[in-house]
């Protein structure tokens, strides 16, 4: 039964993050998209001029949008990191306090309005959260 709860929470986290991905692109999101649409050298030179974004986000997003450039597809990149962040929250809590606490942490992170919001925003928040959690885990 415990395994089912784990997968249920991940399904809930995924479902809550993939709804309403086509809500329009804001100015900040457009800036990251324009950075990501440049080649690697352009991204690095733009980063030197304006240090708005961490360099890993536009570089990885550049690879992601080579497949497709629709708004929903670009947002899905950050949704992916949001779901992985929920998983890492579970792993960290389970390792520190046990499986039951890990499930509680996963459940809370799956429905957290803040974590859902940053997972749908085309900014470096979701992937930065993931990398921070991954470094904390290791």
Image: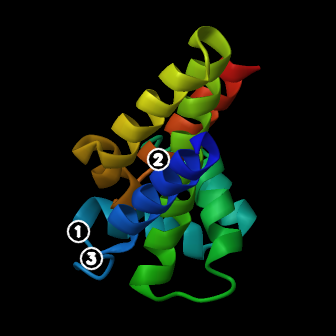
* First of labels 1, 3 by sequence position: 3
Q: Residue 23: x and y, percent? A: 22, 78
Residue 95: quadrant of the picture: top right
| Marks 1 and 3 close (CB-CB < 8 Å) | no
Q: Is residue 96 left or right of residue 53?
A: right
- Circle on res. 12: none
- Circle on res. 20: 3
Q: Secondary structure at mark 2?
A: helix
Q: CA distance from mark 1 to mark 3?
A: 15 Å
The residue that mark 1 highlights is: 26
Assign the N terminus to one quadrant of the image. Answer: top right
* First of labels 3, 2 by sequence position: 3
The residue that mark 2 highlights is: 126
Assign the C terminus to one quadrant of the image. Answer: top right
* Residue for point 52% across, 24% down: 100
**Vertical placement of 55 versus 77: above or below?**
above
């Amino acid at each position: 039964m415990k395994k089912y709860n784990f997968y249920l929470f991940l399904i809930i986290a995924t479902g809550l993050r993939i709804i309403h991905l086509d809500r329009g692109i804001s100015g900040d999101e457009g800036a990251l998209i324009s950075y990501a649409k440049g080649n690697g050298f352009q991204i690095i030179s733009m980063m030197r001029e304006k240090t708005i974004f961490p360099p890993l986000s536009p570089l990885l997003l550049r690879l992601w949008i080579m497949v497709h450039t629709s708004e929903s597809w670009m947002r899905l990149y950050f949704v992916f990191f949001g779901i992985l962040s929920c998983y890492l929250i579970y792993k960290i809590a389970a390792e520190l306090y046990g499986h039951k606490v890990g499930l509680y942490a996963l459940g809370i992170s799956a429905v957290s309005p803040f974590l859902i919001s940053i997972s749908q925003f085309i900014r470096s928040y979701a992937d930065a959260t993931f990398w921070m959690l991954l470094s904390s885990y290791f």
